[in-house]
Image (cartoon, rainbow, N blue to C red):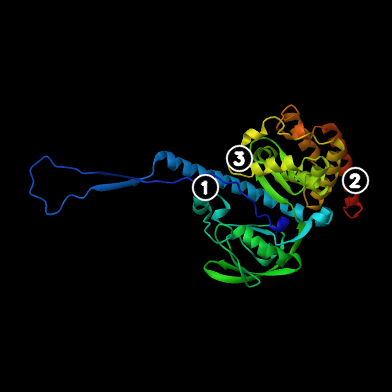
Amino acid sequence: MGQQTDWLSRRTTYGLLTVAALLSGCSMLSRAPAPAPTEPPVARVIQEEPPAITARVAAARADLTRMVNLQDQLYRIAAPLLINNADLCRNHARNLLGFTAKNRYSYSGEFIDAAQAVLNYGDQLEVASVLAGSGAARAGLRKGDKLLAAEGKPLPAGQSAETQAAAILAPLVANSQSLNLTVARDGRNQNLNLPVTRACAFRIDIGNADNINAYSDDQRVMITRGMVNFAQSDEAIAYVLATELAHNVLGHAATTRSAYTLGSIMDNLVAIHPDTSVLIGTAGVKPMPQELDAAADYLALYMVARAGYNMDRAHAFWQRLATQYPPTVLNGYTAHHPATAYRLNVIDKTIAEIKAKQASRRPLLP
């Protein structure tokens, strides 16, 4: 599990929404005289939810669906970056199982009900995503498998299941080459032997905000919803992910003493309904020095190439981003990474270097 929790993410707390139903009845009386009825008339009872509550429930379900879809997209794109670059991640590489697990209590407030209605989550932890190319994927673990036991030890259910399961799984994975996992699938229990996967142990999160930005705090990587929509293609999203991963590997948040500020922003934006007022202006984030940005670009392009993504359009992507969202857009990416010309020069030289190594079949090592 990434960061010893295999990407088990924290969620902020929302207020509880109580869904009430209104009962209304009516009776119909005939004007013509009629014999006395043998039974009293039965009132028609109509049960319905108040429109405002129904709208909030529908909105919660839509918000949750959108967030989960975006998160799944990031996991899919990040998989080869994390697995194929374990040796470049230095002391950030770990033995991972390669899947995430959640239950309805992974969310809060009205989103508990939304998770149950939309994702069919109950109290038991179940597989939310499987990292492509991981040991879990090779062993046949599937999305929707319910986690019952690991190495014969029952796995917990309920409100604290994620943290309790992480405490059980982390030591089992740290010093082993595989894990025996018991899951429930289609009403039957199955035993799977999951080989561990050596990978970069950085958590990947979607930021629920429309500003065009990405953040890293030396432990995690976050791309905003706005950046995903701007980038559009998997390839472009991979450029952004790899660059933030490289900043983490190189410890740039600690170097610039911005880890706390960036971590606070990420903690907020991971919520389904974050407080976006904190993004006004630069949100306290200082511009990254050009030498550090260039170092991250250099390492990131090697990570992109080793993951199998095409790096040829990296220059055009970063140029387009800087043109459409220049440093004057204070809550945008370029305001935090303003040395565009310097970066593009390094990107061009690095791509030429990597292509020369590919042509001569030399190892892609920076």
Q: Earlier in the sequence, mark 3 or mark 2?
A: 3
Give x and y (percent) for residue 221: 72, 46
Please state which of the two labelled residues, at mark 2 or mark 1, is closer to the viewer. Answer: 1
The residue lying at 43 percent from left, 46 percent from top is 19
Q: Quadrant of the N terminus?
A: bottom right
Residue 362 location, x and y as percent?
A: 91, 54
Position of residue 36 in the picture relative to residue 160 (left or right): left
Callout 3 secondary element:
loop
| 62 relative to 22 in the view: left or right | right
Q: Nearer the viewer, mark 3 or mark 2?
A: 3
Q: Is residue 280 above or below residue 175?
A: above
Q: Mark 3 and 2 residues: CB-CB less than 8 Å, in contact? A: no
Q: Is residue 192 left or right of residue 321?
A: left
Taking the spot 56% from the left edge, 66% from the top edge, the residue there is 185
Q: Which residue is mark 2?
A: 353
Q: Quadrant of residue 276?
A: top right
Q: Give the labeled residue for mark 3.
A: 274
Q: CA distance from mark 2 to mark 1?
A: 52 Å
- Near mark 2 (Cα within 10 A), the count class, few <14, some 14-19 or many ≥20, is some
Q: Residues within 10 Å of mark 3 (few under 14, many from 20)?
A: some
Crowd band around label 1 with a 10 angstrom C-alpha radius: few (<14), some (14–19), many (20+)? some
Q: Nearer the viewer, residue 219 or 342?
A: 219
Q: Secondary structure at mark 2?
A: helix
Q: Residue 263's spot in the image, x, y percent? A: 71, 43
Disc 1 residue type (three-letter): Gly
* Amino acid of disc 2: Glu
Viewer can see residue 195: no
